[in-house]
Amino acid sequence: MGLKLAPSQHTTPSLKPPIIRSFVMTTDSPFKRGITPKNGKWFELEELQALVGGRIERVDHASPHHDMYINEEGKLEALAYNKTATDEWDYELAGINDVIVGDAVVIHHQHLVDFYTEEGETHE
């Protein structure tokens, strides 16, 4: 008689990747790294500035549910070209043909806080 396995041992693990809502793209890696806000709800301005290494600038992203943030002075500081972020950037929507330099973060709207209000309301 052969060995029989319990039904739970016959199941295969799900091969679906986890849903990553917000992520960072660094100049030294072609991979996106998932990130979550420190408070678990939304990113604070200081967190975004730390991720891009300076003052932030919002640029258009191909997804209507995300915003991309880059270092506002990246080109002045001669930061390295970021191919992954350039590929993600919606330059057609921006109306210019350019490149992204330095580290970039893509934030899902559920992780955004309106920096101009004190209530901390997230975008819908």
Image: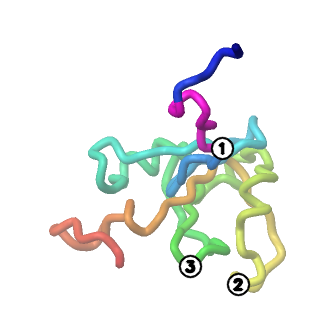
- In the image, 9: left or right of 75? left
According to the image, label 3 marks what residue?
64
Please say if 57 is above or below 92: above
Q: Quadrant of residue 62?
A: bottom right
Q: Earlier in the sequence, mark 1 or mark 3?
A: 1
User: Which amino acid, mark 1?
Assistant: Leu
Mark 2 or mark 3, earlier in chain: 3
> Contact (CB < 8 A) between labels 2 and 1?
no
Count neighbours of disc 1 (C-alpha within 10 A) and say few if under 14, some if 14 to 19, many if 20 or more.
Answer: few
Give above or below for 86 relative to 81: below
Examine the rendered structure and indicate whether residue 18 appears above or below residue 108.
above
Question: Which residue was labeled with disc 1?
Answer: 15
Q: What is the CA distance from the residue labelled 1 to the residue labelled 3?
A: 27 Å
Image quadrant assignment for residue 11: top right
Three-letter residue code for mark 3? Pro
Image location of residue 21, percent across then percent down: 50, 57
Magenta-highlighted residues: 7-14
Q: Quadrant of the N terminus?
A: top right
User: Which residue lies at the image location 56% right of the left edge and 27% below the top edge?
Assistant: 9
Q: Is residue 90 left or right of residue 43?
A: right
Amino acid at circle 2: Leu
Residue 89, image x, y percentages:
71, 68
Q: Which mark is residue 93?
A: 2
